[in-house]
Amino acid sequence: PPNRVEEIIDDHGLPAQTENTITDRETLLETLEECRDRGYTFNDEENTDGIRAVGAAFQRDNDSYGALSVAGPVNRIDDETFYEDLPDIVSNTARSIEIEIVS
């Protein structure tokens, strides 16, 4: 929830891990909103240089229950795979997990 995000930022700040890390509060909040709308998120070398990841959360009873991601080196995950293929795979897998844990 947005108020929890604000608490985390207030407590920990937004320190840079790499030159791609989001360190601006407004940019982070906008990015999180985009992620919520899409249903998945990108990490393009934001935590570790040379590593990309696509992730999606899954829910149970309208609460976050867990998340999954696929990560790998930039030289093995090209832009097409990163922006087009992996989001569908990760999102579909997260939805499958939701169905299994609700049943």
Image (spheres, helix red, strand yellow):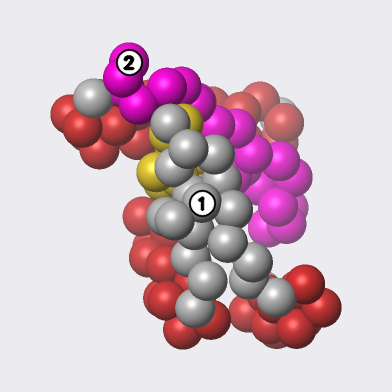
What is the x, y in percent for residue 78? 23, 25
Residue at 54% from the left image edge and 39% from the top image edge: 48
Say which residue label 2 marks: 76
Q: Nearer the viewer, mark 1 or mark 2?
A: 1
Residue name at image x 35 percent, y 35 percent? 87
Would residue 74 be found to the left or right of residue 102 on screen? left
Query: In the rendered image, is residue 30 in sight?
Result: yes
Location of residue 93 with respect to 12 vertically, above or below: above
Relative image position of residue 14 (x, y in whole percent): 63, 71
The total of numbered circles placed on residues is 2
Say if the magenta span includes residue 44: no
Is 21 rendered above or below residue 47? below
Residue 85 in picture, x, y percent from top left = 26, 26
Query: Among all residues in the image, which is located at the extreme left?
Result: 80
SS class, disc 1 = loop
- Label 2 CA crowd tier, 10 Å (few <14, some 14–19, many 20+): few
Upstream in the sequence, badge 1 or badge 2?
1
Amino acid on which disc 2 is placed? Arg
Left or right? Give the position of 12 relative to 17. Answer: right
C-alpha separation, residue under disc 1 versus residue under disc 2: 19 Å
Which residue, as the protein is rendered here, is positioned at the far top?
76
In magenta stretch: residue 74: yes
Mark 1: give few (<14), some (14-19) or many (20+) Cα within 10 Å.
Answer: few
Which image quarter: residue 12?
bottom right
Query: Residue at 48% across / 38% down in the picture?
Result: 49
Asked where in the image residue 37 lies, by quadrant, the reply is bottom left
Residue wearing tag 1: 18
| Residue 90 in sight in this render | no
Q: Is residue 42 left or right of residue 15?
A: left
Question: Quarter holding the N terminus?
Answer: bottom right
Q: Amino acid at mark 1?
A: Thr
Q: Which residues are magenta?
A: 57-77
